[in-house]
Amino acid sequence: MIKKETAALLVKQINKELHSGYLYMEFANYYEEKNLPGFAHWYVKQAGEEYEHAMKIRHFLIEAGEKVTLDAIAKPEKDFADTKAPLLAGLKHEQYITASINAIYEKALELKDHLTAEFLRWFIKEQGEEETNAQLIIDKYEMVGGTGTAIYLLDKELGQR
Ligand code: FEO
């Protein structure tokens, strides 16, 4: 059995993961408009991962005998100043998700809900990777200086994901 309080937080986390997917899909839509299919592809893949995260939490809750109900998914941000803006928003969003996962983990430890704590360790590691990847694209974007040809090449690279 897992604790009701942590179960409720995990149900909310499902919504946050689905919202992450929405956000990244909107990033992808933006990059399609900007004729950067590689950037778009990268975020479509990312959106798919977010759906998997949501499903992983759902599966855990169902296996633990908890009830799962879905809430409305908030509208994602879609007005970006330039092609770097979604990259920065993506990193900020991942930091927010990391904080959310950490808060549930800390609550699980506080309540001695070791099963949930053990389950969340995978997400803690995953968030480390998500933040690293988000930062890496920003670094590459800055390295190439945002010029036309360089962005074209970076787009080709991101399309390989
Ligand atoms: Fe599921 Fe990108 O955090």
Image (spheres, rainbow, N blue to C red):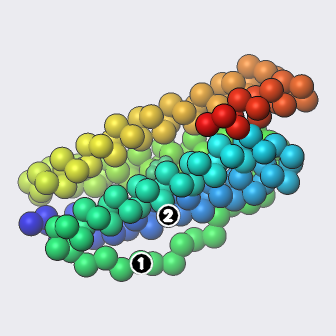
* 37 lies left or right of 138: right
Give the image location of residue 25, x and y in percent.
65, 58
Q: CA distance from mark 2 to mark 1?
A: 10 Å
| Left or right: where 139 falls relative to 70 | right
Report the residue at 60% width, 62% height from top.
22
Quarter of image, res 68: bottom left
| Three-letter residue code for mark 1 | Leu
Are the two marked residues, 2 and 1, in contact with CB atoms closer than 8 angstroms? yes
Above or below 38: residue 149: above
Residue at the spot of label 2: 18
Indicate the amino acid at tag 2: Leu
Q: Is residue 147 above or below residue 34?
A: above
Taking depth in this image into account, of 154 and 76 the one nearest to the observer is 154
Tell me: 54 left or right of 145.
left
- State the mark number for residue 70: 1
Residue 92 % position (x, y): 56, 44
Residue, x 13% and y 54% (percent of image)?
A: 115
